[in-house]
Image (cartoon, rainbow, N blue to C red):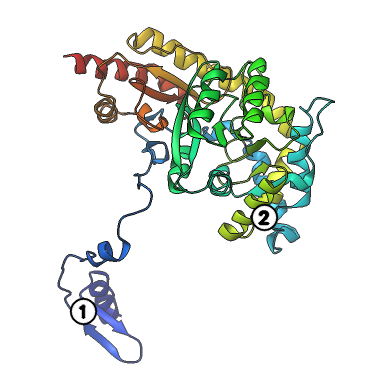
Amino acid sequence: MTVQRALRTLADRGLVESRPGVGTFVRAVRTARPADHGWQTAALRSPEARIQSLPSVLRSTPDDLIALHAGYPDRELLPERLVRSALTRAARADAALDRAPAAGLPELQSWFARELAAATPVDVTPPSRNDVVVLPGSQSGLSSIFRALVPTGQPLLLESPTYWGAILAAQQAGVRLVPVPSGPDGPDPTELSRAFEETGARVFYAQPNYANPTGAQWPTALHDQVLAVVRTHGAFLVEDDWAHDFGITTTASPVAARDDAGHVVYLRSLTKSVSPSVRVAAVIARGPARERILADRGAESMYVSSLLQAAALDVVTHPGWRTHQRTLRDQLRARRDLLLTSLREHAPDVAVEHVPAGGLNLWARLPDGTDVEQLVVECERAGLLIASGREWFPAEPAGPFVRLNYAGPHPSAYPQAARILQTALERQRG
């Protein structure tokens, strides 16, 4: 036993290695040398699209830092009990072993169609199940939509600022980004029409409800104005309804509900509202556009996990889902107002010009001349993670901004976060 114990100790220290049926030997000493991957530069050549580093919102958060940078809601804002129960039931059902249809489970397709149909006026034909394609998250849907609808090298209009993931997906698709200024009340229809005319673009990407990062919600009158512009130019509106379930003082109103001619390609995600681990979304499109998007999805991922689709459907059709949504409104309002109050009291140099009626974020303007990238670094050193506004602009930033997520963990730390931010700004001024 003493010899065996000694051999185990030597093996744990990496000094010997045992080879069953052969014996025990002194481990060979490996000479450390740097790996040379230079050959890959010649093999890969220059990328067709500019390669970006991982966006700050996807960074992991150490427990000792205050996190206002993330793009997802805190775990306590999720329907945890419903999700766990749904995954358990799905794992026991056929969904755990079956392959789903390429366009998605029929029952889930029907649910997405009914959700949009509920907002559709009586004089507009509502979508059907056959208009729906279920996706493994809305990010992959954006990639497919841009590849399917915008030829390589052709222009794509986007609100500015807008969702960084849409910018990244468009760049990877090799299309040309054309920013259209958008404020608290959405884009100016006249400017949008001029952008269509000058560029010859046929697609406009926008977030009419609780836009990321600004939180803007389009007035109802703007829905018809933008639709009129899109129809005039024979174009598409890609409507990203990412925050449909995050209304606070208003309810999301999809532009797609006013269109039955196929001009609006509607994207709805459950990833943030149900669970980041249940990556399920859907695109609703009509006509050849839908078939092209479905073909691209088939080539990209073939189908979405039946298990995740079944779990998502279980959650959103459970009676407790509506109860959770009502509670979520109050929780988001409390967190939003706490962060706003904290900034007003402890960070007077930070201006929030628009209080969002929904979503997860505040869009904050900093004093002119602020070095935002350096500010982000200084805040992290002091224990606060924030996201530079640069990531949300398709071209040059319109000013120094940061995006602050009020749905993150530890809201009791918001006052301290505001103090750290103000101190970092004062240091920059010297």
Q: Nearer the viewer, mark 2 or mark 1?
A: 2
Q: Residue at x 57, y 19 (%)?
A: 189
The amino acid marked with disc number 1 is Arg
**Residue under numbered circle 2:** 307
Earlier-in-chain disc, 2 versus 1: 1
Secondary structure category for the residue under label 2: helix
Residue 75 visible in the picture: yes
Mark 2: few, some, or many residues within 10 Å (few <14, many ≥20)? many
Contact between labelled residues 1 and 2, with CB atoms less than 8 Å apart: no
Q: How far is mark 2 from mark 1, CA to CA?
A: 46 Å
Q: Residue 426: image x %, image y %?
A: 23, 14
| Dot 1: element | loop
Q: Is residue 407 above or below residue 301?
A: above
Q: Quadrant of the N terminus?
A: bottom left
* Left or right relative to 203: residue 415: left
**Residue at 36%, 13% in the rendered image:** 350
- Choose top left, top right, bottom left or bottom right for residue 391: top left
Q: Is residue 186 above or below residue 385?
A: above
| Callout 1 crowding tier (Cα within 10 Å): few <14, some 14–19, many ≥20 | few
Residue depicted at 58% across the width and 49% down the height: 148
Q: Name the residue type under label 2.
A: Leu
Q: Position of residue 293 (x, y in %)?
A: 63, 50
Identify the residue at the far right of this view: 122
Q: Nearer the viewer, residue 305 or 80?
A: 305
Query: Whole-percent x and y of residue 23?
Result: 28, 89
Q: Nearer the viewer, residue 247 or 214?
A: 214
Residue 27 — which label?
Answer: 1
Which of the pair 180/213 is nearer the observer?
A: 180
